[in-house]
Amino acid sequence: MAMTGAVDLGGIKERAEAQRAHAQRAQATQRAQAQPDEASGPGAPPPPPAPAGASVIDVTEETFEAEVLNRSMQQLVVVDLWAEWCGPCKQLSPVLERLAAESGGRWVLAKVDVDANPRISQAFRVQSIPMVVAIVQGQPVTAFNGVRSEAEITAWIDEIFAQVGDALPDAPAGAAPETEQTDPRMLAAEEKLNDGDFDGALAAYRAVAEAEPENVEAVSAARNLEFILRAQAHDPNIVETASPRDIDAQLAAADVLLLSQQPEAAFDRIIDVVRVTNGEERTRARTRLLELFELFDPAEPFVVSARRKLASALY
């Protein structure tokens, strides 16, 4: 599922519910490092680097320095930050992999599972995935979030080479573009989110969005977080217990279904309400459905299908 703002609903749920899991994983890693076994102890050799001609490599916290930072001194490295639960990642990664393979060694794709490698995610200050970062001579030079088309990615890569030069070792000093400065307001909102202060994060994102309606990142973050907080407040059993004539219950059930990554079922719930209501109740249901559509890329097949069903229900 490609959701507006780069993170799918599963991703929001992961952030909201798995803070403790990440902390426990980090603690386990620290314990393993404190009590190494023969295969992974301080004296053990590091994992072997990927072959020089590889176009796509899987990177871990242990291999990041060699495979990304050191390699980027000689070759453009594009880091793909992804996770198994991330729907948009599954759309973007195959495109990146194909383009890397077709580049003829011009650049290499380094894939990082953010769940398995939380320290890399923290280093890049990842707020949403998929996130793609270009590394040149050990430094991030530009990045983007969300799904992009093959043409857009190709243009992005070409722009990087236009600025740093095709022969990276010979690129003039300072040729790499400056990294975009982080908006301190967005950084503050992100910190609240990471600290588990979801209400504070929502207020911070809303403040930026209201001040700058054109700030897509803030608008999307506020919209997505508002949804997750509302959906988590519902009793999950509402899906089974909601009366067909109880509009509030049906809208709540749709939220729960969407949170559990069942968009078709969620949309159908509300469309059924539209079919059997009129006046203010129908308007409420239609308005809520349109709000839920905004959480996703409008080109998603299930969004396109739901829009057709809605039109049929209305007319």
Image: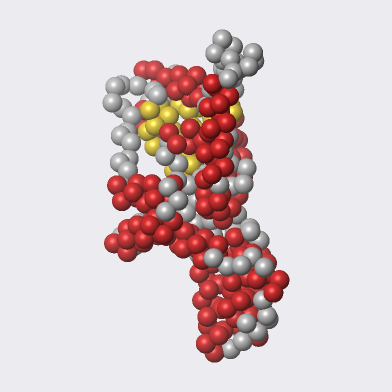
Quarter-wise, where is residue 175 in the image?
top left
Q: Tell me the quarter of the image containing the C terminus.
A: bottom right
Residue 91 seen: no
Residue at screen point 68% across, 81% down: 244
Estimate the x, y position of residue 89 in percent, counting from the top left: 58, 44
Quarter-wise, where is residue 201 in the image?
bottom left
Estimate the x, y position of residue 28 in percent, counting from the top left: 57, 31
* In the image, residue 19 above or below residue 293: above
Quarter-wise, where is residue 170 in the image?
top left
Q: Nearer the viewer, residue 79 or 166?
A: 79
Q: Nearer the viewer, residue 276 or 254?
A: 254
> Is residue 197 left or right of 303 when viewed as pictured?
left
Identity of the residue furthest to the bottom in this view? 279
Estimate the x, y position of residue 200 in percent, counting from the top left: 38, 57
**Colour mode?**
secondary structure
* In the image, residue 245 above or below residue 43: below
Identity of the residue furthest to the right in this view? 240
Residue 4 seen: yes
Residue at screen point 52% across, 87% down: 280
Residue at screen point 48% across, 47% down: 128
Count of marks placed on residues: 0
Estimate the x, y position of residue 53 in percent, counting from the top left: 58, 19
Q: Tell me the quarter of the image containing the N terminus.
A: bottom right
Q: Nearer the viewer, residue 88 or 85?
A: 85
* In the image, residue 273 above or below residue 20: below
Residue at screen point 63% across, 17% down: 37
